[in-house]
Image: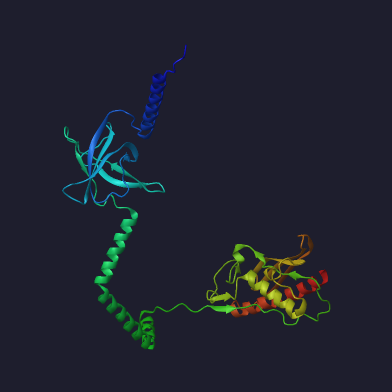
Amino acid sequence: METRAPFVVVGAFVLAAIVAVFGFVYWLHNTGGLGPRTAYHVQFDGPVPGLLVGAGVLFNGIRVGEVTDLGLAPDNPRRVNATISVASTTPVRADTKVGLEFQGLTGVPVIAMEGGMMLANSGAVPTLIAEPGAGQGMTQAARDALRKVDSVLTENSGALKDTIANFKVFSEGLARNTGKLDGIVAGLERMTGVTAPPPKITYDLRAPANAGPAGKTINVQWAIPEPTAVAMLETQRFLFSPPQDYPGFAEAMWADALPKLIQARLIESFENYDLAHAPLRVADLGQPEFQLLIDVRRFRIATDPAPAAEIGLSARIVDKSGKVVVSRLFEESEKLNSVAPAPAAAAFSEAFGRIAKDMIAWTVKAL
């Protein structure tokens, strides 16, 4: 006997499976599930770019339903009517704000609702009026803003040209009367007693011009990196110990920050001793065989018991592997006849000159 295939049973099973899958997807897509729903009409007074049937509906950022119908208003070509279906528990009120939001990188549009206090009318389906420009995207808003700016500029082009011309005449007048304006400002300063701050006076260290005869030369590649120092010494001001203010030093400053100034004058001192074998900066040489590392310990005016310029430099010579070859502490001081910027700069130069000569002799012997 021939066995008949149960085609009806198989077909029914496949159809039931398809319906179940579609039902599950529908339930998963609409977080409200298949529970009670309420329909509302939404009226947009403008375009709703990209909005489709099935798009989500959010209430205070939470998905509560979807768009079930979209159409154009027959009595107003600018108006768009939409019907939304949301969970019946959603607290939609007659004054609930309705707008269009664009989510994600692709800008998928959804209807967004927010707030509301008044109770909705029962019976007939209420119509929610979207806010003006609710469907306007960022690109369209930017275009409209630029269009308005262009319109304003076009309408006022004559006035803008006149204003620019007036500015030109005014600036030319200022240029012609600069001397008179300076005189007026000077007169006002004398009358009010307000004077401009005095200009800064720059002082420099002097490298020793003659560090002695170059009896021995340094036949290696070597460099002097920028010296290290605590933050207090990273300055162009004259420092005092103990800290205090002296007349004239507010307007006095070194030619560069102290570590950079010391580096420049040490290199100049070695050049005055033997230009052909003088050190370079690390940036100019790359990986030298030896480096003279300097740490600035003191560079100040000590006022107790007698005013004097004090310099303290710690020096180490290291090879390219980082091993310390020799090290030494260089200290010098020079008394001041008066605590003023010019005598102080001269005293620092004298003390620095003696340190530079000692450091040259020490380095030549070590290398």
Which residue sits furthest top? 1
Q: Residue at x 29, y 67 (%)?
A: 150
Q: Nearer the viewer, residue 33 or 215?
A: 33
Work out whether 125 lies above or below 155.
above
Q: Quadrant of the C terminus?
A: bottom right
The number of numbered discs placed on residues in the rendered structure image is: 0
Spot occupied by residue 173 in the image (x, y as percentages of width and height) = 34, 86
- Find residue 321 and report its horizontal and vertical position in percent: 77, 60
Instruction: From this view, report whether residue 59 is shown above or below residue 144.
Output: above
- Residue at screen point 41% across, 25% down: 14
- Left or right: residue 65 versus residue 324 is left
Residue 303 is at least partly visible in this image: no
338 or 26, nearer to the observer: 26
Q: Residue at x 80, y 71 (%)?
A: 220
**Residue 241 image point, x, y percent:** 61, 67
Residue 33 drawn at (x, y percent): 34, 30
| Residue 224 against residue 35 in the figure, above or below | below
